[in-house]
Amino acid sequence: MKALVYRGPGQKAWTEVPKPTIQKPTDAIVRIQRTTICGTDLHILKGDVPEVEPGRILGHEGVGVIEAVGSGVERFRVGDRVLISCITSCGTCEACKKGMYSHCSDGGWILGHLIDGTQAEYVRIPYADNSLYPLPPGVDEAAWVMLSDILPTGFEVGVLNGKVQPGQTVAIVGAGPVGLAALLTAQFYSPAELIVVDLDDNRLEVAKAFGATAVVNSADGKAAEKVLALTHQRGVDVAIEAVGIPQTFAICQDIVAAGGRIANIGVHGKSVELHLERLWTHNITITTGLVDTNSTPLLIKTVKSGRLDPHKLITHTFRLDEVERAYDVFGHAGENKALKVLLES
């Protein structure tokens, strides 16, 4: 089969590799029909995730059809159409019992990280009963790919960790796909103001179309001043960091109100400066986290009901064997007005 293989920092190749096989009774083999590229994949290619070894197949999102199941798989059969969760969970370890699937003792974020991932014609899914979701007939499969990672990530690590409440003022720093996912799902809780900060005017226009009440271009380095002006110098109740660089984390520290929360989503490859000398009196809470995907069943219901439309996050579609071209487009998202790129087999 063909797959996108990581060769080391800055290097990747669409190449022939062995087709995966059942290794444990709880495994399933899924034929990929649709997958996508995540910002985390770009971090891997930059060398920000040293646990990813050369030779690893990238990708942790997708939908497909089950080709084979191990003897211990009970919920799925060959031919079933499924959504692949970006998080693998055994369902029985101490962390899984707490709903912390990202810390599963034999799983967590392993696809495209510690084991081969989904940017391939086939993928092996460990603990299939807990790590796959059935696709109802007639659904928009392209939209469902967004449920693999970015929607639960934006919702859980941004909105839920930030404890967004009705009437609050929320700022989302970063209008990439995960930031926009946080914007879409924050509206479940009716905040009074949703301010989105980004360098890119096109993404800010998208944010306005997605429900932002105000947008701030940070290109001039005055984002914090602008947000404070919008809030009459009070600051925001919740600041969601959705980029993963020191500058955007600094903005969140500068705009959070006393008693507020900073919810960090971004994947940080460099250390950031924490200004405790200024914030220690402000009663703020800082949260971090890797998505657990325990909200996926809830998000599936909102998509099925039509209350949430993930398809509008998709801006470009490629064949799976055009994945290297898709990476070029996604890696230069500003120039190409790209949000999520879809890869179809």
Image (tube, rainbow, N blue to C red):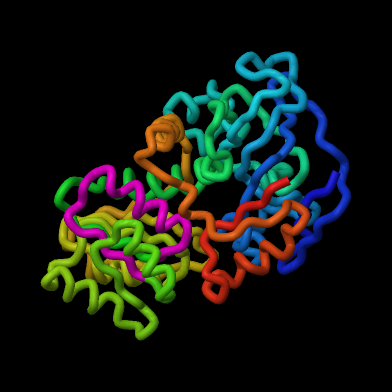
Residue 73: percent from the left, percent from the top?
A: 67, 17
Q: Is residue 108 above or below residue 171?
A: above
Which percent across, then down, holds residue 50? 66, 58
Q: Is residue 192 above or below residue 18?
A: below
Task: From this view, report whether residue 344 is shown above or below residue 23.
Answer: below
Q: Is residue 118 visible?
A: yes
* Left or right side of 36 for 280: left
Residue 218 placement, left or right of 29: left
- Is residue 133 visible in the rendered image? The answer is no
On-image quarter of the N terminus: top right
Q: Residue at x 44, y 43 (%)?
A: 152
Q: Is residue 242 magenta?
A: no
Q: Give the residue at x 69% y 18%.
A: 77
Residue 283 falls in which quadrant of the image?
bottom left
- Specify whether residue 191 is painted magenta: yes
Task: Tell me where the magenta segment starts and ends, as one range.
Answer: 174-197
37 sits left or right of 94 in the view: right
Quarter-of-image position of residue 307: top left
